[in-house]
């Protein structure tokens, strides 16, 4: 049986993983793709930001793909194959707080290795915020340490990439670095079997040799969560766009490092659209599209030391 190649897309919160996966979908329409999304917590948000073409999309609600059991991960991958038996390629989008090592090791366990092959670990790095994020969150460095391909996002033409390239190579000297520009052709990155396990340090190799059993707890011995909180704001009532926009701009606590969601506004600049919020480290972006579901609002906020009642109080004040 032909093994299905898999790429893991990793990177810190807000680095641009979903945007990069959308580029893969657009540029690889000859491939029958499957996408495994790692939802944060109990709400399904990531799929709202993914381009839907002919891809089979499966969601794993947990918040950290390296925390799901191998059985759950295998079930998600097999669900893609069952829905589309001729799947050529699968992309796993890991959550922004996931450690890629346990996930990587999983693909070397016998029950996975007979059906799937790890093609690449693609680390996505935010040109604007990576340095400051890495200084606070060790997981951002760890994600790049295990990536054989690194995509630098959010740079502009003319930006000097030498400093961030040096930073990445200090973490991972063997990583191949690409700028996520209009000229980047993701066709050249997939199905090349570039991931080389021989570069992993001896302590990770020892861990690999102990992962032959299909156990529920084998991942936990090498997994550390960052100390972060999350808040989910949900309502079926319409939101005042001006109040909400001003709250995010002026009153949202700065310890919120990431916010993402879809909103039902009553007085938005363009009416009757589903608005999508992308917020990273003080910078917000709005997008809009047609509604494809019952109108409501769901927004996820992530950060350290979040004051839940304070934030929810400010958000509820925006409800009409």
Image (cartoon, rainbow, N blue to C red):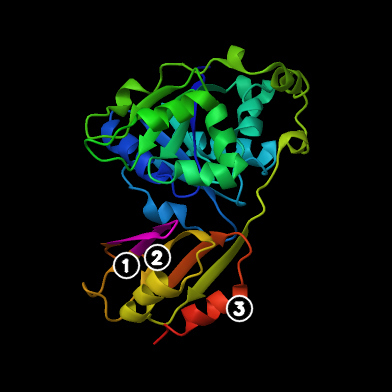
From what the image shows, is residue 171 above or below residue 174?
below
Which quadrant of the view contains residue 125? top left
Could you tell me which residue is drawn at 41 percent across and 76 percent down? 247
- What is the CA distance from the residue labelled 3 to the residue labelled 2? 21 Å
Per the picture, the main secondary structure of the magenta-coloured stretch is: strand
Could you tell me which residue is drawn at 56 percent across and 28 percent down? 145
Tell me where the magenta segment starts and ends, as one range.
276-287
Q: Which mark is residue 304?
A: none
Q: Is residue 5 visible?
A: no
Secondary structure of the residue carrying tag 2 is strand
- What is the CA distance from the residue labelled 2 to the residue labelled 1? 7 Å
Identify the residue position indicated by label 3 in the image: 309
Q: Is the residue marked by circle 3 packed among few (<14), some (14-19), or many (20+) residues within 10 Å?
A: few
Is residue 237 located in the magenta-colored stretch of the structure? no
Secondary structure of the residue carrying tag 1 is strand
Identify the residue position indicated by label 1 in the image: 274
Q: x, y (%) of residue 293?
A: 38, 66
Q: Are marks 3 and 2 in contact (CB under 8 Å)?
A: no
From what the image shows, is residue 253 above or below residue 185?
below
Residue in the foreground of this view, choosing between 220 and 140: 140
Q: x, y (%) of residue 256?
A: 52, 62
Identify the residue position indicated by label 2 in the image: 262
Sequence-wise first label, 2 or 1: 2
Q: Is residue 47 visible?
A: yes
Residue in the foreground of this view, choosing between 303 and 104: 303
Secondary structure of the residue carrying tag 3 is helix
Q: Are marks 2 and 1 in contact (CB under 8 Å)?
A: yes
Quadrant in the picture for the C terminus: bottom left
Sequence-wise first label, 1 or 3: 1
Q: Is the residue marked by circle 2 packed among few (<14), some (14-19), or many (20+) residues within 10 Å?
A: many
From what the image shows, is residue 67 above or below residue 180?
below
Which quadrant of the view contains residue 204? top right
């Amino acid at each position: 049986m032909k093994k299905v190649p898999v790429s893991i897309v990793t990177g810190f919160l807000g680095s641009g993983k979903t945007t990069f996966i959308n580029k893969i979908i657009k540029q690889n329409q000859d491939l029958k793709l499957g996408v495994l999304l790692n939802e944060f917590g109990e709400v399904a948000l990531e799929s709202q930001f993914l381009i839907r073409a002919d891809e089979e999309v499966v969601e794993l609600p947990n918040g950290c793909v390296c925390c799901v059991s191998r059985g759950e991960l295998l079930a998600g991958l097999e669900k893609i194959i069952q829905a589309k038996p001729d799947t050529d390629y699968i992309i796993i989008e890991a959550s922004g707080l996931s450690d890629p090592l346990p996930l990587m090791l999983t693909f070397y366990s016998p029950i996975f290795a007979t059906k799937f092959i790890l093609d690449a670990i693609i680390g996505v790095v935010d040109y604007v915020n990576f340095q400051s994020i890495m200084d606070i969150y060790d997981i951002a460095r760890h994600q790049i340490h295990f990536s054989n391909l690194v995509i630098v996002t959010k740079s502009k033409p003319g930006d000097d990439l030498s400093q961030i390239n040096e930073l990445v190579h200090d973490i991972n000297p063997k990583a191949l670095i690409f700028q996520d520009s209009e000229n980047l052709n993701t066709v050249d990155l997939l199905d090349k079997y570039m991931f080389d396990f021989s570069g992993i340090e001896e302590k990770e190799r020892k861990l690999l040799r102990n992962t032959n059993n299909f156990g529920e707890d084998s991942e936990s011995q090498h997994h550390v969560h960052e100390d972060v909180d999350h808040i989910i704001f949900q309502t079926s009532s319409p939101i005042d766009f001006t109040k909400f926009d001003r709250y995010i701009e002026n009153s949202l606590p700065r310890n919120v490092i990431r916010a993402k969601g879809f909103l039902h506004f009553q007085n938005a600049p363009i009416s009757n659209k589903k608005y999508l919020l992308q917020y990273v480290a003080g910078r917000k972006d709005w997008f809009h599209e047609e509604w494809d579901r019952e109108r409501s609002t769901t927004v996820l906020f992530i950060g350290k030391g979040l004051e839940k009642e304070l934030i929810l109080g400010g958000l509820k004040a925006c409800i009409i």
